């Protein structure tokens, strides 16, 4: 057995979430790293879905984590760490999007495209239709505002309940519900234009 698996970092990571937050607030970097290990992938996927660009998503995630570390003392309720971090991440995405206006380029895996000399099958036609629908959805999604993208990502991609979304956005649950409804309508309208 190696001793590394039972070192101080593994003992700290085994603490309850609220205890990790309290230790991190006291300046314990290992506790903060343990908190981040549990949330890093989710934070990056959320930023990527909102921004649509890996480089921007990395920048927004890194910015959010740095802001979280610097402002951790402001978190009053350790149980609300996830919602608090999500709010910082969403704000980082908004700020980055305002500062940069990039054109997204969608990559297509060439291994999925059949050779030209093969006859087209029903499967390939379906694949082509699905790719066209996906392109239309992607273009429609790009037409949405950052707040609309954010609420759709949090609800439909991250499967977060409205109460958590409301806490993340700092709005009442009813407001989050109406914003989700409006964002769905905006996406539907943009998709109709694309199709």
Image (tube, grey):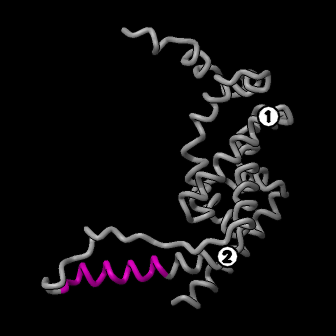
Q: Which residue is more in the foreground, 160 or 109?
A: 109
Left or right: residue 37 compared with residue 174: left
Residues packed near mark 1 inside 10 Å, few (<14), some (14 to 19) or many (20 plus): many
Upstream in the sequence, badge 2 or badge 1? Answer: 1
Q: Secondary structure at mark 1?
A: helix
Magenta-span inclusion, residue 127: yes
Q: Which residue is more in the foreground, 170 or 112?
A: 112
The residue at 62%/84% (across/down) is 190
Based on the displayed image, in which of its 4 quarters is residue 32 positioned?
top right
Based on the displayed image, in which of its 4 quarters is residue 151 positioned?
bottom right
Residues packed near mark 2 inside 10 Å, few (<14), some (14 to 19) or many (20 plus): some
Residue 99 x, y percent position in the rendering: 73, 65
Residue 129 x, y percent position in the rendering: 36, 83
Task: Determine which residue is flagged by label 1.
Answer: 72
Instruction: Write the start and end of the magenta stretch as one range.
Output: 120-135
The residue at 73%/75% (across/down) is 182
Q: In 3D space, how far apart are the residues under numbered discs 2 and 1 (Cα atoms)? A: 31 Å
Q: Which residue is more in the foreground, 119 or 115?
A: 115
The quarter in which the N terminus is drawn is top left
In the drawing, what numbered circle is on residue 144? 2
Q: Which residue is more in the foreground, 125 or 96?
A: 96
In the drawing, what numbered circle is on residue 159? none
Residue 119 x, y percent position in the rendering: 14, 86
Magenta-span inclusion, residue 53: no
């Amino acid at each position: 057995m190696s001793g590394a698996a039972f070192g101080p970092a593994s003992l700290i990571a085994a603490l309850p979430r609220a205890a990790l937050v309290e230790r991190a607030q006291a300046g314990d970097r290992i506790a903060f790293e343990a908190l981040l290990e549990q949330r890093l992938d989710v934070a990056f996927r959320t930023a990527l879905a909102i921004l649509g660009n890996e480089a921007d998503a990395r920048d927004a995630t890194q910015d959010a984590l740095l802001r979280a570390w610097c402002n951790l003392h402001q978190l009053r309720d350790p149980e609300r760490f996830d919602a608090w971090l999500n709010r910082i991440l969403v704000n980082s995405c908004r700020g980055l999007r305002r500062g940069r206006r990039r054109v997204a380029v969608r990559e297509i895996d060439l291994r999925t495209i059949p050779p030209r000399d093969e006859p087209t099958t029903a499967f390939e036609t379906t694949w082509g239709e699905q790719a066209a629908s996906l392109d239309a959805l992607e273009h429609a999604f790009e037409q949405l505002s950052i707040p609309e993208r954010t609420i759709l990502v949090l609800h439909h991609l991250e499967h977060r309940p409205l109460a958590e979304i409301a806490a993340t956005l700092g709005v009442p649950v009813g407001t989050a519900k109406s914003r989700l409804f409006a964002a769905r309508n905006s996406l539907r309208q943009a998709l109709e234009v694309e199709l």
